[in-house]
Image: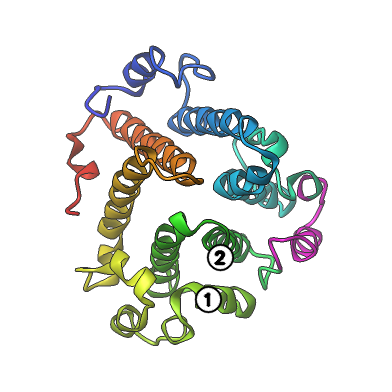
Amino acid sequence: MATEPTLDDAVRYLGATAYRHDLRPEMSVAEAQQAVGATLLWHLRVLAGWQPRSGAEAFRLLAAGFEIANTEAHLRTVGGAELPRPARPYQLGALATAWPRLARTVSPPELRAELAASVWGDPGAESPAAVGTGMRISAAVRTAAAMPEAARWTAGRTALLVGREEFVVGRRLTEPTARRAGRLLGSAAVGAASFADFRQRLSATARWALDGVDEAADLWRAEARWWDRLERDGSELLHGSRWGSGPVVGAVALLSADAWRVRGALELAARGGRPTEVFDAPG
C-alpha cells in the first residue's frame, strides 16, 4: 500500500481489508488515518467486551491514546483554533476514562480543571502541548504500574516523548508532568541539561529505547525501532502459554503496531508512493 501512486489507490486497497469500515472515496490522508484508528479502537472495544470486569481498567489504559486525541482536538476547538473541518471524536464507549466530562468543557481552564479532578491529573498548564504531553505521561505511569508486561514499552515511549519535547522542540515539562515522568525515567534524567546527560541518566527500564541515538535529531529512528520492538514483544506475549494478561496485552500491541504501519503507508501513498524502508529502521 505504501508504494501505491496515489492516496485514492491506497484507500481502495485498504477497502479490501479489516480497516474498510469507515473508509470512503476521496478521503484526505488525515481522514483515512483516523478511519484506521477508529478500526483499531473498535477491535479494542470488542476485546474488552470479552474480558472479566477486572480487565476493564487495563483496556482503558491501552486505549488511552484515543481519549488523548479526542481531548487535544477538543482543546483546539474551545481554544479558538480554526480547523478546516473538526474530526469526529473517537467513539470510546466503556473505554472512556474522563472523556464525557472533558467533552462538555467550554474553555481551556475548565478542561484543565476537569483533568486535574480525574485520574489524568493536572497537566500543569492549559496549552495544547502541556495537556497532550501531560496526558501521555500520566497514561504511561498508570500503564506501567498496572501491567508489568508493558512497563518497558511505556518507559521507552516516555523517554522518546520527553527527549523530543525538551531537546528537539525545546519545551520544558511542567512541574507536575516532570514529577510523573521521573517515576519512569528517573528524576535525574528528567532534569538533565543536555541530551547526552539525559541518555546517560535514564533508568534501566527506559534506556534501551535510546541505545545508539547520539543526537536528539535522530530520535525519529528510535521511534521506528520502538514500534518494531512493540511488534516483536507483542508476538511473543500473544503466543506465550503462561496464565495471565500477557496474551491480551500482546494482541493489543500487534494490532497497534499494524495500525501504525498502515497509517504510515497512507502518508507515503499520499506523497506519490515510497519504498517501505521507513518501516525498517535498524533494530
Picture coordinates of residue 73, whole percent (x, y): 63, 46
Q: Does residue 32 lie above or below 13 as drawn?
A: below
Q: Which residues are magenta?
A: 102-121
Question: What amino acid type should be assigned to the residue bearing mark 2?
Answer: Val
Packing grade of label 2 (10 A; few <14, some 14-19, many >=20) is many
Q: Horizontally, is 218 left or right of 158 in the view?
A: left
| Label drawn at residue 141 | 2
Q: Is residue 204 magenta?
A: no
Q: Horizontally, is 127 left or right of 200 in the view?
A: right
Picture coordinates of residue 280, whole percent (x, y): 19, 44
Q: Does residue 140 lie above or below 18 as drawn?
A: below
Q: Horizontally, is 226 left or right of 31 in the view?
A: left
Q: Secondary structure at mark 1?
A: helix
When asked about the image quadrant of residue 283, the answer is: bottom left
Reading the image, the residue beneath label 1 is 183
As measured in the structure, the alpha-carbon distance from the residue carrying label 2 to the one carrying label 1 is 7 Å
Q: Is residue 110 magenta?
A: yes
